[in-house]
Image: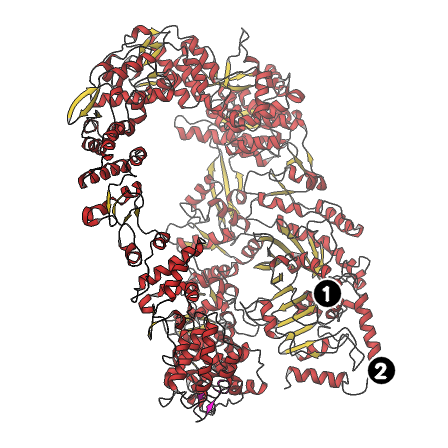
């Protein structure tokens, strides 16, 4: 088989005669292709649609999620000079040889004739459209690397279709770099270097690609566009990623199916991912002959797909196409759904050809498809609430399209819909009701709210659609759907309907407050137009709380009392409601108004339209609205000096404020003059101040009693401290105090604001507690700036403050005391020996006294040390001026300075007075402190080379060192602190003689640096250095000019040749010497590398070529070369040239070589060393030894080949596998893989010969030796899913973990390394497994990686029998779940063996049904019918619960046709099955009782007792009925069997006792219900038969016979007492004489009477018989008492209208 390149060469040679004569037809073909490609489409976007179309038509490998990725970049990887390049990546199977031949032709598409197979391409040269935007498209696929050129080929004069092989520009590595190294390249890559004039259009189209492009594509699931530039700021294309996912739960119909599809987009400009779901309806229609066209002759069916988007369509802010031909056109239909079909397109692909008969045939079928889809969405969703169906109506084409022919489609859709029962009506039962649009009416939204909330509160609304119109479902009847309802012609009800509904419903007292207010609002908003001056004013609509707390109703006309004041009040704010009602009760003797109930007022407060409602209540209804403050003022005015009310009122205000009913401002206003009860029980109305009650107060502790009573200061009584309860609210003990303090200014120390008078308590010593209390009080008064003068003066001068005086205690006024911390006070006493200081006694007061410094200052306490120091300082300074200071005197001065310093006290004046005196003894005699130096080790070096006056430590001792800071304050130099100038100034003569220490030399250098920085001369220092051999080197002391400064960067070079260079001794001077390069250089030392290299180069040149250049020199040189190479120093160019070209390296070949001719041997060379003969450097012990390997890096820099990769190209050509693969060592394989790795990175293309050699079976796997394409590499990403023995994984125990380092290399030669790509191999290996855990693991892996078997791959499921045994079976014999355990013998239940994580895999991939299907249940029941005599209760319950849950029309039909038996009641533990035609539903319990007593066999259907939630009894009975089980009431034949003789009959003279006015009134009221739809005349005619009756009584029993016909022909018969009979034709009513006594006889008589009367009256309306019968029975038991019957009628919303009242009056007046 030819390689891809050979195939291209063959096409060029054979088809295009390249290398031969030019074909004369080539130019014509070139022009034809050019013209067609240029004229075919009007827009540049065609190329993009064609590429997407081609990608959709491509074939994809199994397990691959088909994707198309577009990347645009400014990088010119093709070398064509294109400013922008577009790359298209597609993970299809790749180009085959036929595809290549097709693309090199015109009109030879490989997709022709395959339209029925799903191909959507059409014109055959779609790929050529890329020439609109590029002059040279490139294709990389399946080894093909070709390009085409727009310009004619020089060999053939033909462009567009001549393939050219591409070796580079780009390479695969170039493409990989653009695509990203995170993943492998897709199989096919198309590269389009864009034309300059097309870049803007292409970027614009890429930025505006429709997200819905994947909507009708069956293959491509992911599509992305992005821009890649080195500088992301240059990106202009809006990146997007689109993906689709289909919900495979498919609903099938005869010719249609539906499913849900989800599209999601991830745009770079949007941080959130967007998603939209689409309900898809796909329906097939046969193609009509009159619509056939040539381009679609092979198509037999039109497949029309309609997409209904749920949510906002993904359109990126652009208009959304409404018509698709697999890919989007540019037709915006203005319809809310999308039409997809195999339309014939215009050449521009922008629109479909609307005049084309093929397209017209499709459009003619769209209305049918739409109506079917819409019906599927609306009426077949049995288990879905109606409210969830309403949004589906948004899919109706309400808006007109800009395309007239599409408006024809719209009109046909509307016409069909108007004939369909699609409008959901309001039904307050489980039964959904759908009617035609013309039969349905709307309600106002506000009234809907009333009805909905009323319904939730139990108001019966079953007759809502009984007033002449069906009412639209409330979920649909919203403003949102006005346009839809107008489109369908649904109109509102008339105003009369509302009046009927309100009168017939209990919407005032029977509803919650919210609904009640909605009703009031409805009345308010329609008051002027509909309800004013009507009986609505007399309806008791308004609620209020009566005196006894019970809610009472009041009509609007009765709200205003005779004095013009409204009796009903309400709060202005809802939060005050309960508070006002409760407190109104506490003060009830002063109020005469009533409040609306709390619940009502709260509801009004929360009401959305409370403004409208309140305005109506205030202005129209005249309800009084009171604020919380108004109410409080009323109570305030009513207190009238009452002590209890005054206290209660404080509680009222406190709780009102704490519960936020009154504001602080309100309370402050009321409290300003609030009456208070004092400690004597007097009610005080005037006051200057208020003191808290004495009990527990602080002021009592300090002052003993209220000293200011006469000044108007009120002491509150203790009643305010006691607990109390008002209006249901508890006030705890002392709870009022904070309120009284805040709002009545009741205060305690320290909050009391004193009058301007003396505080008598300050004139006597105070306890510690009271002293602090007083200071707290002063603190508070300072903050408030409220310190009366007399009050303050008494505190300042009073002797109440305890002090300490030289250890003695006493009391002084604050103005005569000092406060320091305790230690400072003691020290002051110690230091100031000549004076005593009165200090506050801190031992007495503790540290807490320091918290009151500002308060103490306020009352005169002194804190300043300056005041103390004034005295102490004078004394000490007088001593300091004397010349006879002793050592002790000096230390006393220093100690005092220290004291001042530590206390941060001002000592400047003291220090200045003594610092200039010559009283300090130094090494140079007595000196003043200024200029003297305190010696320490920092000055040791300076003392060697200079004369400095150091303080005489022999005299003062080491103790002087403790006063560094004090000496420094006096002017003494303490610490060296870089005082180089002092050293320079005192430098000794001959400072560098006698081999100075290292410290001295370094100090001289530092002094030089200091002088230079400060621009001072340092010649004196420099001369001292140069004049002596002062520098120590490795060769002794030398003059500076003879020395070299060691430099770690290069001094090693000097050491290669022993001790030929004197280096300054670093060990002696330390590393610091290196920091003085500049100073050393000025002294004459060599410090630069360049100078050092010049001297060294002379040595190296001679020694390198001599035999004396031995092993140690090589290693030393390499070491120094390494060190210098790692620095910024550069070797001279001739130096490097000599080293690299000289032959000074010994090799294993026995001769020296230059570095570039050598290889350094290493372990990586070992596997190939046996087949190579290379000049390895001699690393044996005879020469360099292994030490040479330490210099790999240096040798490489010098040109030595080090790494294996540099020689792998020689290895690749020598590979030859042995016949026996087991002889191949693991290291050889790894070495080969390393070779491949290196070659790949270098862009080297592996030859075909190499690929052929490696395609043999030579890789050792756990399943034996395999070829690479049959092998898998187990990596860490596999470990969470599989084990190494689960498939043909490479034997890593054999090769070691290193094999994992060559994933890409193994992948290159065919090994599967990606987890997602191994499904097919793992699945093919599944049959070799028998261990259940292994199979489960493999299943989990296949599931997680989305494996999907091909159509010919058998699907088998392992059913385990133990851990190592089992059997493979087909999916059709399995089921995942068997919740009720019914199918254990019928199907293999997988949940018994497998965990839930695999259920989706079994369901989707293996096609195992999740649950037994309805058909499975049918078959199970048939088996039970044939094989089981009786069922258990659990079996029967489970079966029918399933049927109930999955009930549908098809289920009903199947059960009706296939079920012969149904379960019947049984006395035994089991449940019997009986033929359904002989079993009945017991809808009449009396009949059930009769037949159950008389029949030997059970004839009534079974149902679970007690009922279970999953199987409601009513639902089960309904199912029985629908599948053919008869109701007993409908199946029984009733026959009167009593023959009454005239002699036995006695006419009742007063028939009114039987047929009375109460009975007729009740019947007339029932018949007047709107749902009966009977006018007055019809109602009266119905009861006339009762008025004309003749009533007879008999002693004989009146009986009736009930008969049931069975399927066998037998008849079950039973007789029962009838008691009464009405012969309608003869107008006779027969009654069996009543039996006396007993409730059962009475209820039996009442029941039969009600039944007979109802059947007679409602002969034409049998569906209402039971309802009327129940009413008559209740009235009968009440003896038709007029008041009782009246209440009964009202409770049932039944009323008798005036015309019926007149009829009754007339009828009975005549009687």
Q: Is residue 1382 above or below residue 734?
A: below
Pinpoint residue 430: horizontal percent, then vertical percent.
Answer: 54, 42
Is residue 195 part of the magenta span, yes or no?
no
The residue closer to the viewer here, 1662 or 1179, is: 1179
Pinpoint residue 1155: horizontal percent, then vertical percent.
Answer: 48, 85
The residue where tag 2 is placed is 24
Say the numbered circle drawn on residue 553.
none
The residue where tag 1 is placed is 47
User: Alpha-carbon distance for marks 1 and 2?
Assistant: 30 Å
Q: Quadrant of the N terminus?
A: bottom right
Asked if residue 1273 shows in the view, the reply is no
Quarter of the image holding residue 1292? bottom left
- Neighbours of disc 1 within 10 Å: few (<14), some (14-19), many (20+): many
Scheme by which the image is coloured: secondary structure
Q: Residue at x 43, y 17 (%)?
A: 667
Quarter of the image holding residue 12? bottom right
Helix, strand or loop at mark 1 = helix
Q: Quadrant of the C terminus?
A: top right
Q: Is residue 1641 left or right of residue 896?
A: right
Q: Which residues are magenta?
A: 1144-1158
Name the residue at the left extreme: 808
């Amino acid at each position: 088989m030819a390689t891809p390149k050979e195939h291209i060469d063959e096409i060029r040679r054979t088809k295009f005669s390249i290398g031969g004569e030019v074909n004369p037809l080539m130019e014509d073909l070139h022009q034809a292709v050019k013209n067609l490609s240029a004229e075919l489409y009007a827009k540049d976007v065609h190329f993009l649609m064609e590429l997407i179309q081609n990608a959709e038509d491509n074939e994809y490998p199994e397990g691959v999620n088909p994707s198309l990725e577009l990347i645009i970049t400014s990088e010119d990887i093709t070398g064509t000079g294109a400013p922008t390049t577009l790359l298209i990546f597609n993970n299809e199977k790749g180009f085959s040889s036929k595809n290549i031949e097709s693309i090199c032709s015109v009109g030879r598409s490989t997709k022709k004739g395959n339209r029925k197979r799903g191909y959507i391409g059409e014109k055959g040269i779609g790929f050529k459209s890329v020439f609109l935007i590029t002059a040279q498209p490139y294709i990389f696929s399946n080894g093909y690397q070709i390009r085409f050129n727009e310009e004619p080929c020089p060999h053939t004069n033909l462009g567009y279709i001549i393939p050219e092989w591409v070796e580079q520009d780009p390479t695969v590595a170039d493409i990989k770099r653009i695509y990203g190294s995170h993943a492998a390249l897709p199989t096919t890559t198309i590269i389009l270097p864009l034309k300059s004039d097309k870049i803007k259009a292409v970027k614009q189209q890429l930025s505006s690609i429709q997200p819905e492009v994947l909507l009708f594509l069956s293959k491509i699931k992911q599509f992305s566009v992005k821009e890649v530039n080195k500088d992301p700021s240059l990106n202009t294309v809006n990146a997007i990623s689109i993906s689709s996912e289909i919900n495979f739960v498919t609903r099938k119909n005869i010719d249609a199916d539906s499913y849900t599809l989800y599209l999601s987009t991830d745009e770079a400009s949007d941080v959130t991912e967007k998603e939209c779901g689409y309900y898809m309806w796909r329906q097939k229609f046969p193609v009509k002959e009159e619509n056939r066209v040539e381009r679609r002759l092979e198509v037999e069916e039109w497949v029309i797909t309609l997409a209904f988007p749920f949510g906002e369509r993904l359109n990126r802010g652009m208009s959304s196409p409404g018509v698709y031909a697999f890919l989007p056109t540019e037709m915006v239909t203005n319809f809310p759904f999308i039409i997809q079909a195999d339309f014939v397109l215009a050449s521009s692909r922008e629109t479909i050809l609307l005049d084309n008969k093929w397209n017209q045939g499709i459009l003619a079928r769209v209305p049918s498809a739409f109506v079917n889809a819409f019906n599927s969405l609306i009426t077949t969703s049995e288990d879905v609430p109606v409210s969830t169906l309403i949004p589906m109506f948004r899919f109706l084409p309400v808006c007109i399209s800009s395309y007239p022919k599409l408006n024809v489609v719209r009109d046909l859709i509307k016409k069909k819909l108007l004939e369909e029962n699609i409008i959901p009506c309001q039904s307050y039962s489980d039964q959904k009701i759908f009617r035609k649009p013309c039969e349905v009416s709307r309600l106002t939204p506000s009234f809907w709210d009333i009805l909905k909330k009323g319904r939730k509160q139990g108001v019966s609304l079953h007759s809502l659609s009984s007033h002449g119109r069906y009412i639209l479902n409330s979920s649909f009847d919203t403003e949102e759907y006005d346009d839809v309802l107008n489109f369908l012609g649904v109109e509102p009800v008339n105003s009369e309907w509302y009046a009927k509904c309100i009168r017939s419903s209990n919407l005032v007292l029977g509803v919650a407050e919210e609904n009640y207010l909605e009703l009031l609002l409805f009345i308010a908003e329609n008051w002027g137009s509909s309800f004013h001056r009507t009986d609505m004013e007399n309806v008791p609509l308004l609620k209020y709380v009566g005196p006894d707390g019970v809610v009472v109703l009041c009509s609007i006309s009765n709200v205003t009392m005779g004095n013009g004041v409204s009796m009903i009040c309400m709060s202005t704010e809802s939060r005050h409601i309960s508070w006002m009602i409760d407190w109104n009760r506490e003060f009830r003797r002063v109020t005469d108004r009533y409040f609306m109930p709390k619940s009502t007022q709260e509801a009004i407060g929360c009401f959305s339209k409370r403004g409208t409602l309140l305005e109506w209540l205030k202005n129209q209804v005249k309800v009084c609205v009171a604020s919380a403050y108004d109410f409080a003022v009323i109570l305030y005015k009513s207190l009238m000096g009452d002590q209890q009310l005054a206290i209660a009122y404080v509680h009222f205000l406190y709780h009102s404020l704490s519960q936020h009913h009154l504001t602080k401002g309100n309370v402050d206003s009321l409290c300003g003059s609030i009456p208070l009860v004092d400690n004597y029980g007097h009610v005080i109305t005037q006051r200057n101040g208020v003191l808290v009650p004495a009990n527990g107060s602080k002021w009592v502790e300090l002052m003993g009693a209220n000293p200011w009573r006469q000044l108007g200061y009120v002491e509150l009584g203790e009643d305010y401290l006691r607990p109390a309860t008002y209006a249901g609210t508890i006030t705890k003990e002392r709870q009022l105090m904070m309120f009284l303090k805040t709002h009545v200014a009741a205060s305690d120390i320290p909050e009391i604001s004193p009058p301007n008078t003396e505080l008598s308590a300050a004139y006597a010593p105070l306890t510690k507690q009271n002293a602090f209390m007083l200071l707290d009080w002063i603190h508070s008064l300072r903050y408030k700036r409220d310190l009366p003068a007399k009050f303050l003066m008494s505190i300042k001068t009073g002797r109440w403050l305890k002090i300490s005086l030289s250890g003695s205690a006493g009391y002084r006024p604050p103005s005569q005391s000092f406060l320091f911390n305790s230690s400072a006070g003691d020290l002051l006493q110690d230091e100031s020996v000549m004076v005593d200081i009165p200090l506050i006694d801190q031992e007495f007061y503790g540290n807490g006294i320091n918290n009151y410094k500002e308060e103490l200052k306020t009352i005169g306490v002194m804190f300043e040390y300056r005041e103390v120091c004034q005295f102490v300082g004078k004394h000490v300074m007088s001593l300091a001026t004397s010349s006879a200071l002793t050592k002790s005197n000096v230390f006393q001065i220093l100690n005092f300075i220290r004291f001042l310093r530590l206390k941060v006290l001002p000592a400047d004046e003291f220090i200045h007075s003594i610092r200039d005196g010559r009283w300090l003894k130094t090494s140079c005699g007595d000196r003043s402190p200024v200029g003297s130096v305190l010696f320490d080790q920092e000055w040791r070096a300076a003392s060697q080379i200079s004369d400095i006056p150091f303080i005489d430590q022999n005299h003062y001792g080491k103790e002087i060192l403790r006063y560094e800071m004090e000496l420094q304050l006096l002017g003494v130099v303490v610490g060296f602190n870089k005082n180089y100038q002092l050293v320079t100034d005192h430098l000794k003569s001959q400072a560098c003689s006698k081999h100075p220490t290292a410290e001295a030399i370094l100090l001289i250098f530092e002094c030089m640096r200091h002088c230079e920085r400060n621009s001072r001369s340092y010649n004196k220092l420099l001369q001292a250095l140069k004049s002596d051999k002062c520098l120590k080197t490795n060769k002794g002391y030398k003059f500076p000019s003879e020395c070299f400064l060691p430099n770690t960067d290069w001094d090693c070079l000097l050491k290669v040749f022993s001790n030929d260079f004197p280096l300054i001794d670093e060990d002696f001077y330390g590393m610091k010497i290196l920091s003085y390069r500049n100073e050393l250089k000025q002294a004459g030392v060599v410090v630069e590398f360049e100078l050092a290299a010049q001297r060294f180069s002379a040595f190296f040149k001679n020694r390198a070529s001599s035999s004396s250049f031995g092993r140690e020199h090589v290693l030393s040189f390499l070491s120094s070369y390494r060190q210098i190479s790692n620095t910024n120093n550069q070797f001279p160019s001739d130096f490097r040239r000599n080293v690299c070209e000289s032959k000074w390296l010994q090799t294993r070949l026995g001769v020296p070589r230059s570095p570039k001719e050598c290889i350094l041997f290493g372990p990586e060379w070992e596997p190939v060393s046996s087949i190579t003969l290379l000049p390895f450097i001699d690393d044996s012990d005879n020469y360099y030894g292994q030490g040479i390997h330490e210099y790999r890096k240096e040798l490489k820099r010098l040109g030595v080949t080090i790494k294996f990769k540099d020689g792998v190209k020689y290895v690749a050509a020598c590979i030859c596998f042995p016949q026996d693969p087991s002889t191949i060592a693991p290291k050889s394989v790894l070495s080969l893989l390393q070779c491949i790795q290196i070659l790949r990175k270098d862009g080297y293309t592996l030859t075909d010969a190499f690929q052929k050699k490696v395609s043999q079976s030579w890789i050792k796997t756990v399943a034996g030796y395999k070829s690479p394409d049959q092998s898998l590499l187990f990596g860490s990403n596999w470990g969470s899913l599989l084990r190494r023995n689960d498939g043909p994984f490479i034997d890593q125990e054999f090769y070691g973990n290193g094999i994992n380092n060559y994933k890409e290399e193994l992948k290159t030669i065919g090994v599967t390394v990606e987890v997602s790509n191994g499904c097919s191999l793992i699945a093919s290996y599944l049959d070799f497994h028998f261990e259940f855990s292994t199979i489960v693991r493999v299943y989990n892996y296949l599931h997680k990686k989305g494996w999907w078997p091909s159509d010919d791959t058998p699907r088998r499921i392992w059913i385990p029998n133990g851990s190592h045994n089992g059997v493979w079976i087909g999916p059709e014999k399995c089921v995942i779940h068997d919740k009720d355990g019914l199918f254990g013998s019928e199907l293999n239940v997988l949940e018994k063996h497998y965990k839930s994580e695999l259920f989706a895999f079994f369901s989707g991939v293996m096609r195992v049904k999740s649950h037994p299907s309805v058909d499975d249940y049918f078959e199970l029941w048939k088996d039970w019918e044939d094989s089981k005599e009786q069922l258990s209760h659990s079996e029967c319950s489970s079966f029918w619960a399933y049927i109930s849950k999955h009930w549908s029309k098809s289920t009903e039909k199947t059960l009706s046709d296939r079920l012969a038996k149904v379960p019947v009641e049984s006395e035994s533990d089991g449940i019997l099955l009986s033929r359904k035609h002989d079993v009945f539903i017991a809808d009449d319990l009396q009949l059930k009782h009769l037949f159950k007593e008389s029949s030997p066999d059970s004839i009534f259907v079974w149902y679970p007792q007690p009922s279970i939630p999953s199987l409601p009894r009513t639902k089960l009975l309904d199912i029985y009925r629908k599948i053919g089980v008869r109701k007993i009431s409908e199946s029984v034949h009733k026959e009167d069997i009593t023959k009454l003789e005239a002699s036995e009959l006695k006419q009742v003279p007063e028939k009114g006792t039987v047929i009375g006015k109460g009975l007729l009134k009740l019947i007339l009221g029932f018949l007047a219900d709107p749902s009966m739809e009977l006018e007055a005349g019809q109602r009266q005619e119905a009861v006339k038969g009762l008025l004309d009756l003749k009533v007879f009584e008999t002693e004989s029993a009146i009986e009736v016979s009930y008969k049931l016909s069975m399927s066998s022909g037998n008849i079950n018969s039973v007789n029962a007492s009838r008691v009464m009979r009405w012969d309608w034709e003869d107008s006779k009513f027969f009654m069996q004489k009543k039996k006396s006594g007993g409730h059962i006889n009475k209820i039996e008589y009442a029941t039969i009477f009600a039944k007979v009367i109802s059947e007679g009256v409602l002969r034409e309306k049998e569906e209402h018989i039971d309802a009327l019968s129940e009413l008559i029975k209740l009235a009968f038991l009440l003896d038709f008492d007029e008041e009782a019957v009246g209440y009964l009628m009202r409770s049932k919303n039944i009323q008798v209208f005036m015309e019926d009242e007149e009829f009754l009056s007339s009828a009975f007046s005549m009687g």
